[in-house]
Image (tube, rainbow, N blue to C red):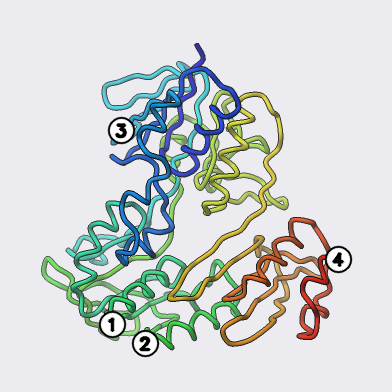
Amino acid sequence: MAHIVVVGAGQAGQQLCATLRDQGFEGRITLIGAEPVPPYQRPPLSKGYLLGEMTRERLFLRPDAWYADRGIELMLGAPVDRIDPGAKTVQVVDRVIEYDQLAIATGLAARALSPEAGGDLENVFTIRTLADVDALEGPLKSARRVLIVGGGYIGLEAAAVARKLGVEVDVVEAGPRILGRVASAQTADTMRALHRAHGVTIREGVALECLTGEGRVTGAVLGNGETLEADVVIAGIGLLPRCAIAEAAGLETDGGVAVDAFGRTSDSHIWAAGDCASFLYRGERVRLESVQNAIDMGTAVARNMLGAATPYVPMPWFWSDQYDVKLQIAGLNTGYDRVVTRGEGAAISHWYFYGDDLRAVDAIGDTRAYMVGKRLLDMGKTVSPQALADPATDLKALLKA
């Protein structure tokens, strides 16, 4: 009986297993996860779960019985030590598991502050796993002042949660501005104003020199010599693809586990999906760090493992909840040379163009703009930047133009 092994029990791994069964695969499926809990949602960790508005049970993608009913063997708390492509085996502690096909869906790891910078002090946290947030919850709720290192989405979401809990918040961003790698200056301006209106102090263009404290963090020294008090520090300084086992197995990596248009790695029996997978998009190799990509790519790769031979064509979309504001993003804003802004105040959208080619839209408190932008991108329609810039233009009319 054919045996498919999936390494990585996150959103992509769970979706891959579900699709294999939905597509009629009757062989063995083993889903291996390093964490001791079944696959769960990650986005709520830094939002509703950290605030205490979402229970632990609601995080889980499926109940345990779902896996048993579908004959999916769950191996949890079992980090993979080694993949041997020649022998077609996976080693987990003292167990060697043979496979016919293997899928790598190991996701991402949070980049931590170095011990030299004080990252090993007590009450210094990252936000990536359920265990991370469980450890952070108590100290955050009892904190007086929190320092967040990094002005990306995770850092800003954590800032919003801390302010909702009544904690004073400082955000320190080493780059020239917040959201520097992921959004336009216009979107950054909108989100900066939102956080400042909620009492967050944001410092940009200033790096962390080191954290201070004896055993437990008490503050920080910045690169400009300024000192800050902090009894909790959250590092939001980026995510790294978990591809060490792929590299050790001799698989090609390029900013992640490199795959072809079908999700196959440099080994014909090994595939990859989700956050850890690197693939070609618009002629460049990219990784998409989103729930949507994990689900869509997990589905596509599972079908291709069963012989579909259908290229994976992503339709990127993302979101971020901060305070009571939803930032919704459609498309991928790589290579843009112009941003058109519509609206103001509580409902505003920023549209990314390369020439007259629409690349992406950031909609902040404006679901209508997001939905229209997403449909335009999905349809591959050309839209005039001038028309978008005109507030009199009916967005829905652009879909029929």
Q: Which residue lies furthest to the right in this view?
A: 401
Q: Earlier in the sequence, mark 1 or mark 2?
A: 1
Viewer-nearest residue: 27 or 189? 27
User: Mark 1 and 2 residues: CB-CB less than 8 Å, in contact?
Assistant: yes
Q: Which of marks 4 and 1 is in front?
A: 4
Q: What is the secondary structure assignment of the residue under circle 4?
A: helix
Q: Which of marks 3 and 4 is nearer the N terminus?
A: 3
Q: Hey, what amino acid is under mark 4?
A: Lys
Q: Which of marks 3 and 4 is in front?
A: 4
Q: In which quarter of the image is residue 35?
A: top left
Q: Residue at x 47, y 75 (%)?
A: 175
Q: Which residue is drawn at 88% across and 68% down?
A: 401
- Where residue 176 sits: x, y (%)? 50, 79
Residue named by callout 4: 400
Q: Distance between the residues labelled 3 and 4?
A: 52 Å
**Of the numbered discs in the image, which one, if any, rests on residue 199?**
2
Q: Residue at x 66, y 24 (%)?
A: 307
Q: Which residue is drawn at 42% across and 65% down?
A: 154
